[in-house]
Amino acid sequence: VQGDRFGANDINATNTAINALKEMSMHEAKASDWSAAAPYKQRIDIARIKEGDSPIISLVFPNWITDPNYIKPARKAYSCLTKVLTYNGYIELICLAKKPSANFIFSVKGA
């Protein structure tokens, strides 16, 4: 069976794509930055994100956050998140049912 040959550009493009899957960044969704009316939306700028990407979004608590008075409201606020849309250079967090009333930190991986 004869197939296509990979050139250096093909290999470099593949490596770039694989490395992007491993990148993780942390961002904060602030309670004060949600839109006033439902659906509640918030834009988060992420330079490397592209429209059509399918990143993994997760709630995170960095090592310096140990206060239960921050953790419990942050978990509740994150649970309001319904979906995330990707655009060129930013994501949009969307909450359809309830507006988050606390800040939370989340990670974005695989963009």
Image (spheres, rainbow, N blue to C red):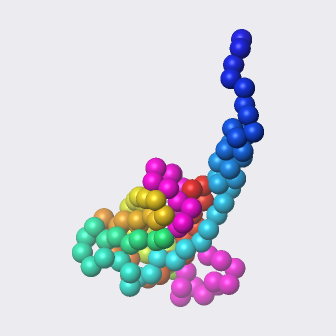
View extreme (left): residue: 37
Q: In the rendered image, which quarter is residue 4 located in?
A: top right
> Does the magenta segment cover residue 101?
no
Relative vertical location of residue 96 with respect to residue 28 in this rendering, above or below: above
Any part of residue 24 in sight: yes
In magenta, the rendered stretch is: 46-71
> Does the magenta segment cover residue 52?
yes
Q: In the rendered image, which quarter is residue 85 located in?
A: bottom left
Q: In the rendered image, which quarter is residue 67 located in?
A: bottom right
Residue 13 in the figure: left or right of residue 36? right
> Which quadrant holds the C terminus?
bottom right
Residue 48 in the figure: left or right of residue 97? right
Name the chief secondary structure element in magenta. loop
Q: Which residue: 45% across, 54% down?
A: 51
Q: Nearer the viewer, residue 111 or 75?
A: 111
Relative vertical location of residue 46 with respect to residue 28 in this rendering, above or below: above
Return the x and y of residue 96 as percentages of the image width and height. 30, 65
Q: Which residue: 71% across, 11% down?
A: 1
Residue 27 in the figure: left or right of residue 17? left
Return the x and y of residue 9 as percentages of the image width and height. 70, 41
